[in-house]
Image: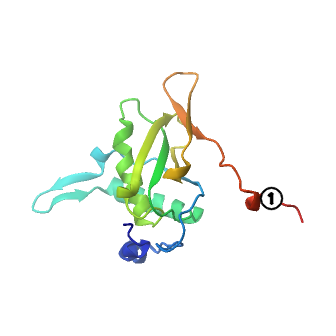
């Protein structure tokens, strides 16, 4: 059974995020695209503090503030239920591990109510993109509408996921006035 998005009320109140979909709503078929700064590696998110255990680093707190601000500006639609997430991260350092960047992104999506909980992420894929402006590009879609394609860049060291636009229902077709 799915939990209502309203169970994330504490996160919404703390961040000023607005949840625009409730558990009673029909599952969305919309695809959501988001761009936020590339997060720090999970290795740089926390540090050991004597007597306090693991605490967030200043780097991680700064990223969360900046990424949250960028996310709110984009006003992404909340997606309820099982989702598939595709992530393209700009590669700043060759020594970085792509999987060490995912936790911060998923936590951000939950905090701002874009997804209910990261336990509803039934699949995800991540790829490095060539460096340009330090962004992570995130595509979130209901699990039932997933159809990916991966394109390798000419350098052979990076690439990106692409998805075809979902087929439109007759009722959804654009009609000029």
Residue at position x 52%, y 61% from top? Answer: 71
Q: Nearer the viewer, residue 44 or 9?
A: 9
Q: Disc 1 marks which residue?
A: 174
Which SS class for mark 1? loop
Indicate the quadrant where residue 94 lies: top left
Q: Taking 106 as reference, is 21 left or right?
A: right
Q: Considering only vertical position in the picture, is 42 above or below 7?
A: above
Q: Is residue 60 left or right of residue 21?
A: left
Q: Residue 53 vs residue 124: left or right?
A: left
Q: Residue 159 at x, y = what percent?
A: 53, 31
x, y percentage for residue 81? 45, 61
Q: Depth check: 138 or 169 in front?
A: 169
Q: How is the image coloured?
A: rainbow
Can residue 64 be seen here? The reply is yes
Q: Residue at x 48, y 25 (%)?
A: 157
User: Does residue 132 appear in the picture of this structure?
Assistant: no
Spot occupied by residue 36 in the image (x, y as percentages of width and height)? 51, 53
x 58%, y 22%: residue: 154
User: In which quadrant of the rendered image does the N terminus lie?
Assistant: bottom left
């Amino acid at each position: 059974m799915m939990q209502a998005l309203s169970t994330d009320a504490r996160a919404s109140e703390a961040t000023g995020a607005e949840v625009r979909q409730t558990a009673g709503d029909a599952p969305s078929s919309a695809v959501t695209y988001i761009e936020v700064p590339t997060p720090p590696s999970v290795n740089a998110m926390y540090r050991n503090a004597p007597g306090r255990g693991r605490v967030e680093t200043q780097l991680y707190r700064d990223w969360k503030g900046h990424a949250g601000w960028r996310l709110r500006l984009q006003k992404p639609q909340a997606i309820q239920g099982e989702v598939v997430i595709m992530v393209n991260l700009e590669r700043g350092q060759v020594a970085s591990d792509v999987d060490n960047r995912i936790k911060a992104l998923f936590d951000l999506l939950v905090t701002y109510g874009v997804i209910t909980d990261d336990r509803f992420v039934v699949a995800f894929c991540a790829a490095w993109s060539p460096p340009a402006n330090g962004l992570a590009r995130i595509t979130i879609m209901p699990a039932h509408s997933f159809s990916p394609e991966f394109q390798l860049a000419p350098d052979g060291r990076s690439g990106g996921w692409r998805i075809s636009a979902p087929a439109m229902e007759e009722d959804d077709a654009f009609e000029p006035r």
